[in-house]
Image (cartoon, coloured by chain):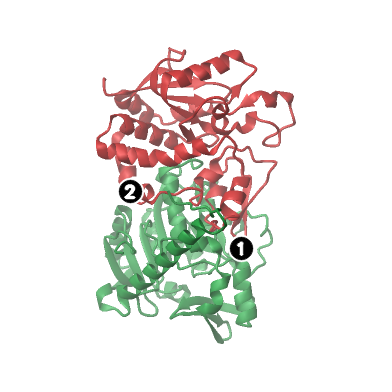
């Protein structure tokens, strides 16, 4: 028991889709909780709901700055966690809670919702709407290895988490247009199609092998850009895909 | 360098034993034969391959939706499709030499196409995309474990559609519609017409038409595929095959046992691995240089490096 990492889950203005994605690991989630993770608090899945001191906290949802309690909980989460993970498009980038995204009508309320990185320092991003169960699982296993693993495992976890930490440093805005500015206009797109596959709202198609986005559909979740192999790519990690996949699957047996 | 060919368990020169496949194939018919076998054996339920308009006209429901390609009228424009039969596979055989965003169908293949075990063929960069997607499935829920066979093809560079149009219709003075086959080999770009005419262009002419994204690529022989294949290194009509992963090893072993392929040891064929190694090193060192130049491209301004 002592070897588990302590984890918390702060739920701000999110639709619970991230929670569901976490739960959709099914037996994998039970194994995680059995062997690696001591879930200290979490609104939907645990009895304790209030923020406690933990190793890693996941934050779902953006933060409504008109809601004093939400702001306080977010600040407290930062103070009491060694590592803060922004889980999902809303926590990372505001996603659909922000102004006129995904074809929504303009609503004044949208102006109050901030990505958590605008209020506290965030260490790791898991973008996407919803983030995938497998991505949450992989990050959870890597967080465990980082804190409790051998030297070798720590190195692997550091390398694995590095691009997600870089994403957290990059900023609190995301858009389909990141593909334009940082990939295509940098002469880096080679037309693999990852972005279109990753888009949860089918806003991306390919014209002559290059992505075309429908801006009115884009919810700015960050999935396309972060899925792109030319946004960031680590040969150290990805070249060992077979061994890493096997290790993660073995850990969850 | 030593790592230019990636990690592999075995390497042979091979061709399909199916005469019908060889008739349609670019070289040894490796991809078509291997996917055909995997379909028969239930190793995959279907595969994402690059077809052309002829196929898409017949089976629009199997083709990728593309706002710029609703009519499917352009000859030799690759269209990513999901195929579930050997006949479809055969209809899509052959290299198209321009960009086919095959990975764009990887999630849809497991959704509206209903595949549990997906095969995919692609260039080295597309194999990188697939593996990144398995380790970092940011927008690819439940996709990673469904990828049952990823076949990579050797790739020096790729061309946008407009480049192929220009090369064939301007430089080679042939209507794209009348082209039977295109090929890069022996230092030339070859265009074969349906009426038997052959035009060759020196690669010096084709270089400026390459897509820029290819010039930062550090992988020639699809190091991250389960099985990778290409013509380089093997005699005409044969393909060089690298068997790389556990999945690749298992599928290749079964296909060999079923008599799908005729093989020769790679050490026995000309020009053999020596040429593959040479070209791989050429590509990698050229593109490493490009990456270095990008770092100091402007005045105190760098172009972005995607690798960390």
| Colour-to-chain, red | A
Q: Is residue A23 above or below residue B236?
A: above
Residue B287 location, x and y as percent?
45, 64
Same chain letter for marks 2 and 1: no
Quadrant where the C terminus of chain A sits is top left
Per the image, the residue denoted by label 2 is A242
Q: Is residue B70 visible?
A: yes
> Measured along the vertical axis of the image, is residue B197 above or below residue A17?
below
For mark 2, name the chain: A
Q: Residues within 10 Å of mark 2 (few under 14, many from 20)?
A: some
Are there few (<14), some (14-19), or many (20+) residues within 10 Å of tag 1? few
- Identify the secondary structure beneath mark 2: helix
Residue B117 can be seen in this image? no
The answer to whether residue B1 is left or right of residue B80 is: left
Quadrant where the N terminus of chain A lies?
Answer: top left
Front residue of this view, candidates B298 and B16: B298
Closer to the camera: disc 2 or disc 1?
2
Q: Residue at x 60, y 62 (%)?
A: B56
Q: Chain of mark 1?
A: B
At mark 1, the secondary structure is: helix
Which residue bears the numbered disc 1?
Answer: B58
The location of residue A230, given as percent across then percent down, is 50, 52
At 28% from the left and 29% from the top, the residue drawn is A148
- Which image quadrant for residue A38? top left
Instruction: Locate residue B52, reporting x and y percent.
Output: 58, 66
The colour assigned to chain B within the rendered structure: green
Instruction: Give x and y (percent) for residue B6.
Output: 33, 60
Query: On screen, B126 above or below A219?
Result: below
Q: Gap between marks 2 and 1, in whole Å?
A: 38 Å
């Amino acid at each position: 028991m002592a070897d588990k990492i302590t984890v918390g889950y702060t739920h701000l203005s999110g639709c619970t889709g991230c929670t569901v994605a976490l739960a959709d690991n099914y037996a994998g989630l039970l194994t995680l909780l059995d062997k690696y993770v001591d879930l200290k608090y979490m609104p939907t899945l645990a009895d304790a709901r209030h923020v406690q001191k933990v190793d890693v906290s996941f934050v779902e949802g953006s933060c409504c700055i008109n809601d004093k309690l939400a702001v306080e909980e977010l600040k407290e989460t930062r103070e009491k966690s060694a590592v803060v993970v922004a889980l999902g498009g809303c926590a990372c980038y505001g996603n659909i809670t922000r102004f006129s995204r995904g074809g929504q009508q303009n609503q004044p309320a949208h102006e109050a919702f901030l990505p958590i990185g605008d209020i506290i320092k965030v260490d790791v991003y898991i973008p996407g709407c919803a983030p995938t169960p497998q991505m949450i699982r992989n990050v959870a296993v890597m967080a465990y290895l980082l804190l409790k693993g051998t030297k070798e495992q720590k190195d692997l976890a550091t390398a694995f988490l590095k691009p997600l930490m870089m994403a957290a440093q990059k900023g609190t805005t995301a858009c389909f247009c990141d593909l334009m500015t940082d990939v295509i206009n940098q002469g880096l797109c080679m037309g693999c199609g990852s972005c279109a596959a990753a888009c949860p709202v089918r806003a991306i198609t390919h014209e002559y092998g290059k992505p075309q986005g429908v801006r009115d559909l884009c919810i700015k979740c960050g999935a396309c850009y972060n899925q792109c192999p030319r946004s960031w790519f680590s040969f150290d990690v990805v070249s060992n895909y077979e061994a890493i996949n096997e290790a993660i699957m073995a850990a969850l047996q | 360098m030593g790592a230019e060919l990636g990690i592999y368990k075995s390497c042979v020169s091979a061709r399909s034993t199916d005469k019908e496949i060889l008739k349609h194939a670019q070289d040894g018919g490796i991809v078509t034969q291997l996917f055909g076998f995997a379909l028969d054996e239930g190793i995959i339920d279907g595969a994402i391959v690059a077809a052309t308009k002829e196929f898409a006209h017949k089976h629009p429901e199997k083709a990728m939706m593309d706002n710029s390609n609703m009519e499917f009228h352009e000859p030799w424009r690759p269209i990513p499709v999901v195929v579930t039969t050997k006949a479809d596979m055969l209809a899509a055989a052959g290299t198209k030499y321009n960009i086919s965003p095959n990975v764009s169908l990887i999630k849809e293949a497991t959704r509206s196409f209903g595949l549990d075990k997906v095969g995919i063929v692609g260039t080295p960069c597309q194999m990188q995309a697939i593996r990144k997607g398995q380790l970092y499935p940011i927008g690819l829920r439940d996709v990673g474990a469904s990828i049952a066979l990823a076949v990579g093809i050797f790739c020096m560079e790729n061309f946008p559609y407009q480049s192929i149009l220009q090369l064939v219709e301007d430089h080679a003075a042939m209507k794209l519609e009348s082209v039977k086959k295109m090929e890069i080999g022996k230092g030339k770009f070859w265009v074969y017409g349906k009426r038997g005419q052959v035009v060759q262009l020196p690669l010096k002419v084709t270089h400026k038409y390459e897509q820029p994204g290819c010039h930062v690529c550090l992988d020639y022989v699809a190091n991250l595929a389960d099985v990778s294949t290409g013509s380089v290194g093997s005699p005409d009509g044969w393909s060089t095959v690298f068997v790389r992963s556990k999945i690749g090893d298992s599928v290749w072993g079964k296909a060999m046992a079923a008599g799908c392929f005729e093989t020769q040891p790679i050490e026995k064929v000309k020009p053999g691995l020596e040429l593959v190694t040479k070209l791989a090193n050429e590509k990698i060192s050229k593109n490493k240089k490009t990456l270095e130049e990008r770092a100091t491209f402007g005045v105190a301004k760098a172009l972005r490096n995607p690798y960390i």
